[in-house]
Image: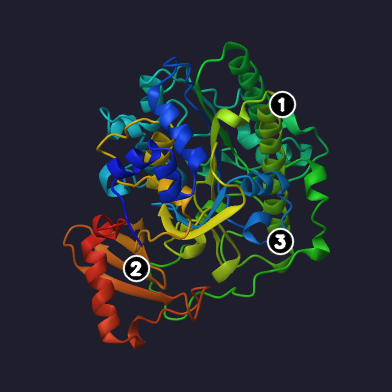
Amino acid sequence: MMLLTRREFMLALGTGAAGAALFGAGALAARAAEASAGAGAGGAKRPNVLFIAVDDLRPQLGCYGHKEIISPNIDRLAAGGMRFDRAYCQQAICAASRCSLLSGCRPDTTKIYDLSHPLRQMMPDLVSLPQLFKNHGYTTISLGKIYHHRTDDLVGWSEKPDYEKGAWKGRGYLAPQSIEDIKAVPPAKVGKVRRGLGPAFEGPDVPDNAYADGIVSDNAVARLRKFAATGEPFFLAVGFYKPHLPFNAPRKYWDMYPTEKIRLPANNKPPTDATRFALTNWGELRAYTNIPKAGPCTDELARQLIRGYCAAVSYADAMIGKVLDELDRLKLRDNTVIVLWGDHGWKLGEYGCWSKHTNFELDTRAPLIFAAPGVKPGQSTAALCEFVDIYPTLAELCGLDAPKTCEGVSLAPLLAEPGRRWKSAAFSQYPRGNVMGYSMRTDRWRYTRWVNRKSGQVQAEELYDHKADPGESRNVIAGTDQAVLKKLRAQADAGWQAARPGA
């Protein structure tokens, strides 16, 4: 199958019938050619961007085949565009993942591996994704949680980001008992960073906009109405907090998931022969008042946690639906590129663990959906994709040149031809003190090596065979053919540069 360079791709897009013959997406070709002409040139109007981020969202959604989850709005977005079945974040923690995506750079380039380093502190001269659009005449607006830090990347936005207008204060608790629980916890026991944590979930009978995500969706609707009135090209970033902890959502979303129908995961033990670096003690969840400080959760508590996560997903989905409904009502959909992504996955008792913070498939794989003018609806692709690819893809679809600093590749060719040859691997990483875990996902294997950050020596290795063991329940590094290991180690040494299409 033919692989094209970016220049060849753009030329194909601009040649009408030739572009359609190459990619089977004449409408996409016309839209990209129109976008490249710029606003006001010959009456052309640049496509808008609706950029939807969902915190801690694993691909446990109806459109990904999980019918027990009620997610009709994300499902219809997928039905109207392209669902990416194997999309991977670069690190399974909020700040590092988001900075990587919004910069187009991998964690070893941003040097952001934790929650404490804002992007502009580490890369002051970088042209970020929103900044690229701002520099090309777009009004760029940030609502809710886009970056991890409230004031990061101010240069990228046309206005100061609207984080949540106070609705996230105190982690967003509304139930009287939750507030009493917080008051009863001495600050010294909470810790210097994670103060004000109460229970891990609540479900009071309150309206949607009593919580932060309802306010975010209301603000997004208001912004869309303003954009429709002015006609200005926009990059509207809308970041939803749920289903991030605590799993707080209005009661009606909890009622969608009766406790007796909640199933506990079957794979509730650590993978056989996993290394000592592989898993965590899920300290993020243990910081909440109703979670044991050591040992496992009871089955009863585990069911309520899973129920709360599902309720929070359905709540976020409903708020996304409000935004999509308004986009349609205002007749903006036909000229808007929509991308929806979760910043990483999340464990719900699998391996006997909770939260993210690992290199496993459960934490590194996340939802990614694109819907754009000219993109054939109802498609999916099994191509290996990475979140660093989102930046150059949006630039491509809107006729902009992504900066050379981007370390991903545009997914635009996949939007037109989902089955084309693509990357040979996707790469993620996670630190454990002075050891960095580098994980490579190929079509069949997940190979992870744990490397001393000072000496460069490999401390441990893991290998999971997704053909025989898609749940990654056994580290088979010891019993795998040496020829297979040699090839995988060489591929890991070659890195992401050698895994790109056509490399």
Q: Nearer the viewer, residue 434 or 347?
A: 347
Answer left or right for 51 relative to 394. Answer: right
Where residue 16 appears, x then y in whole percent? 43, 38
Q: Nearer the viewer, residue 79 or 147?
A: 79
Answer left or right for 221 relative to 408. Answer: right
Query: Height in image: 231 above or below 500?
Result: above
- Dot 1 or dot 2: first in sequence order is 1
The residue shown at (18%, 62%) is: 456
Q: To which residue does mark 1 refer? A: 329
The local crowd at label 3, few if under 14, some if 14 to 19, many if 20 or more residues have their Cα within 10 Å, is: some
Q: Which disc number belongs to residue 448?
A: 2
Q: Nearer the viewer, mark 1 or mark 3?
A: 1
Where residue 234 appears, x then y in whole percent? 51, 22
Image quarter of residue 13: top left
Q: Secondary structure at mark 1?
A: helix
Whole-angstrom CA distance, mark 3 to mark 2, is 32 Å
- Dot 1 or dot 3: first in sequence order is 3
Q: Which disc number belongs to residue 301?
A: 3
Assign the N terminus to one quadrant of the image.
bottom left
Q: Which disc number belongs to residue 22?
A: none
Whole-angstrom CA distance, mark 1 to mark 2, is 47 Å
Amino acid on which disc 1 is placed: Arg
Whole-angstrom CA distance, mark 1 to mark 3, is 42 Å
Where residue 79 appears, x then y in whole percent? 65, 49
